[in-house]
Image (spheres, rainbow, N blue to C red):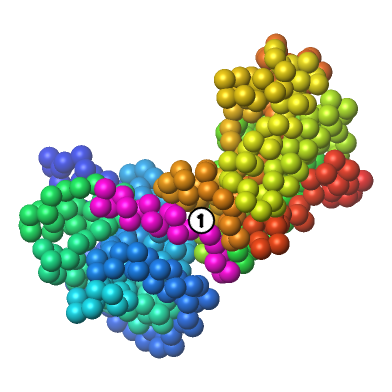
Amino acid sequence: MTDGKRVAAPGQQLEDRGNNRSHRPSSKAFREFIATNWEPRPSDLPERSEAAAFAAARRARLGQRFAGERLVVPAGQLVPRSNDTDHRFRPHSAFAYLTGLGTDQEPDAVLVLEPNRDDPGAAHEAVLYFRPAAARDTEEFFADSRYGELWVGARPTLEETEALTGIRCAHIDTLADAVAKDAGQVRIRVVPQADAAVTALVAKVRGEVGVVADAAVDEALAEALSEMRLVKDEFEVRELRRAIAATAAGFDELIRSFPRAAGHVRGERVLEGAFGAKAREEGNGLGYETIAAAGNHANTLHWINNDGAVRGGELVLVDAGVEVETLYTADITRTLPVDGRFTEPQREVYQAVLDACEAALAKAGEKGARFRDLHAAAMEVIATRLEAWGMLPVSAAESLAPEGQYHRRWMVHGTSHHLGIDVHDCAQARRELYLDAELEPGMVFTIEPGLYFRADDLAVPERFRGIGVRIEDDVLVTEDGAVRLSEDIPRAVAAVEAWVTDLLGG
Ligand code: GLY
Ligand code: MN
Ligand code: MN
């Protein structure tokens, strides 16, 4: 399908040829006919979203941090996948966090937090600028394949989005004036890299009033928005629980597909597809590309090709997460025996990783523990086990010292990251608030140690070669300790064997 906006002509420029295949209707008769005889649009407005009150509280917190300043938070643009086809739209995470708007809402929208010029200490007013639904007598309605109602569905009206979010809404055509207003007297910050057009608009406005470009101004806003998200509110925890429950259902479906996967030349894709179908049914989709890695593929950390066979007797490492409509995502890894039984070497490696998980979880429950301590606790277990297997050229203690680190040959990645709207959440937070920070109630992060023994690794005992194991859970810190949000997804050896066996009808 194509909208055929441009007309083919001799000497036509390359960029104008994208729609040469189209047959767009354009007669006057057609235009008059298509503009008429439609039912009036429904006049009832949507209910206020559950996220709205939480988003308002987040905006208020951000406003206090940047009192008296204009804050510009774009949703971002549609991203082309190839030529004139776009990826499904996903708003920038900061925009989703501050508006409560999740999937598909609303390309090119921009949230502006406008300070009170008379009283800089007073709360900002939030205004959401976007392009509302076009009338049925417009070209957009039938001819615009990116935005038109006949192509991608109706856009919301200003009133509808106002009712949904509780944020005053205004037409995107008024954004430029709103950003430029009193520009020399009010500091403007924009979330960088969210929307090149909005960043350029802010740069132009600054230039016009002689404000010298300083990247740190906008980076401070991105940093604050990342750091605010380190501690989740009640709504976020609820959404993460929903994402994890959907992910549990996805893992069940994936295990049920084992027999079909085992008979398929690209069995890993069968697993990926089974999980992906459930993710689309239960939520918005995947929070990140699924890793479905059978046998030695598990030792390629980001194995997303998933084009290998799944053989009896092997383990499959599956790292997958459902993202719900509010964009919160789970991030879960399970390593599963295809036949429902671990072999002895597989069990040994698996148990070592599981013990490392337990050590990190116990640390997460200790008062005063720092984020970095989780990794240290897991590494202590891993190094000690590798020492017992005779794999370290030094003692475990020497390996654990900063100048050693031999054990990291078999787990080069970190043990934990924050989790939320982004799978790697809060990525712009400063180190002292992330890695070096004390854990606080409301933080949600993964614990995901692993051991990766490649088939071609001569430093690994032969019986372990080709085995890769990671176990990943999502953890919430509460006043009473650390809670595994993913505790309903089996992970102990016997529980995993029973899970697989039961679902396979054995
Ligand atoms: N799935 C990506 C990660 O575990 O960090
Ligand atoms: Mn992870
Ligand atoms: Mn993961």
Magenta: main secondary structure equals: helix
Q: Quadrant of the N terminus?
A: bottom left
Task: Please give the name of the residue rendered at 72% of the width and 18% of the height, measured from the top-left corner.
Answer: 395
Task: Please give the name of the residue rendered at 43% of the width and 46% of the height, measured from the top-left corner.
Answer: 430
Q: Please check the rendered image and state whether residue 164 is part of the magenta-colored stretch, yes or no.
A: no
Task: Report the span colored magenta.
Answer: 216-236
List x then y, in percent, for residue 246: 67, 59
List x then y, in percent, for residue 271: 69, 42
Relative side of 460 to 195, left or right: right
Name the quadrant containing residue 39: bottom left
Q: Judge the density around disc 1: few (<14), some (14-19), many (≥20) Cα neighbours within 10 Å.
A: many
Q: Please check the rendered image and state whether residue 227 is part of the magenta-colored stretch, yes or no.
A: yes
In this view, 120 is above or below 38: above
In this view, 329 is above or below 347: below
Give the camera-side residue of 198 and 45. 198
Circle count: 1
Relative side of 153 to 138, left or right: right
Residue 351 shows in this picture: yes
Relative side of 154 to 338, left or right: left
In this view, 490 is above or below 135: above
Query: What's under tag 1, amino acid-wise?
Result: Leu
Task: Please give the name of the residue rendered at 64% of the width and 28% of the height, measured from the top-left corner.
Answer: 411
In this view, 224 is above or below 44: above
